[in-house]
């Protein structure tokens, strides 16, 4: 057991952090979404959709984000065409929770852990908005490739970024670096 002590500590820290952050996020969702009557997404999901529209418009497309009337999502329109939707899973918070749990489980100094968690989360959030905007534009331009874009390319982008941030953390800042 002694030789597996670091693995056990890592798992305890990871799952404790993950479940605490997930419980906080779940409570936030429960209190900020409305499913009965008029649907309303959580404010973070609406914010992500609005910021995605701003980015799409930066690239000279006419874009809009509108609360879906029949589900918990925000419709993204490009040039008046319903192109994509932003759901709770698209707002990057679940991925940021996973990222932070890993950083804390492989903790470095308290200062480095806090700064890297904050800056990494901000980077993931930003990359996610770029990813959604790019996905929406690609679906608008190449609708027949929607499946491969949504199911393969774009998850690879966000998970690839998170993995890269983890590798940097472990090798440069954590107490486990060689």
Image (tube, rainbow, N blue to C red):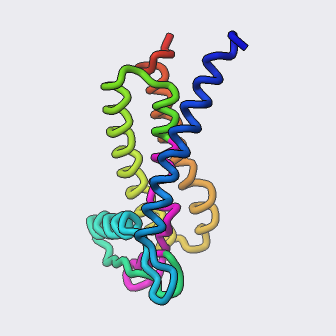
Q: In the image, what residue occupies the spot 31% across and 32% down?
A: 115
Q: Residue 55 vs residue 93: left or right? A: left
77 is within the stretch colored magenta: yes
Q: Quadrant of residue 133?
A: bottom left
Q: In the image, what residue occupies the spot 56% across and 74% down?
A: 143
89 is within the stretch colored magenta: yes
The reply to whether residue 126 is in sight is yes
Q: Measuring from the top left, give residue 161's x and y in whole percent.
A: 48, 41
- Work out whether residue 147 or residue 33 is closer to the camera in this orientation and state it: 33
Q: Measuring from the top left, give residue 35's x and y in whole percent.
A: 51, 80
Above or below 124: residue 31:
below
Q: In the image, what residue occupies the spot 28% across and 67% down?
A: 54
Q: Measuring from the top left, give residue 58's x and y in whole percent.
A: 26, 65
Count of all numbered marks drawn on residues in the image:
0
Q: Measuring from the top left, give residue 104's x and y in whole percent.
A: 46, 31
Which residues, given as a range, are shown in magenta? 73-98
Q: Residue 30 vs residue 78: left or right? A: right
- Work out whether residue 3 or residue 148 is closer to the camera in this orientation and state it: 3
Q: Quadrant of the N terminus?
A: top right
Q: Quadrant of residue 59?
A: bottom left
The outermost residue toward the right is 1
Q: In the image, what residue occupies the spot 34% across and 76% down?
A: 63
Above or below 177: residue 143:
below
Q: Residue 125 vs residue 103: left or right? A: left
The reply to whether residue 52 is in sight is no
């Amino acid at each position: 057991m002694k030789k597996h002590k670091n693995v056990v500590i890592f798992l305890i820290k990871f799952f404790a952090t993950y479940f605490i952050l997930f419980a906080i996020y779940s409570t936030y969702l429960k209190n900020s979404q409305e499913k009965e009557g008029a649907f309303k997404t959580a404010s973070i999901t609406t914010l992500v959709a609005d910021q995605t529209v701003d980015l799409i418009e930066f690239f000279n497309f006419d874009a809009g984000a509108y609360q879906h009337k029949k589900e918990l999502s925000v419709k993204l329109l490009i040039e008046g065409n319903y192109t994509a939707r932003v759901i709770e899973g698209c707002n990057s918070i679940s991925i940021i929770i996973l990222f932070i749990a890993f950083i804390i489980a492989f903790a470095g100094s308290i200062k480095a852990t806090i700064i890297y968690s904050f800056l990494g989360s901000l980077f993931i959030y930003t990359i996610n908005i770029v990813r959604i905007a790019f996905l929406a534009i690609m679906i608008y331009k190449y609708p027949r490739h929607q499946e491969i874009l949504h199911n393969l390319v774009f998850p690879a982008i966000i998970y690839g970024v998170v993995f890269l941030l983890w590798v940097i953390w472990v090798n440069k800042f954590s107490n486990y670096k060689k």
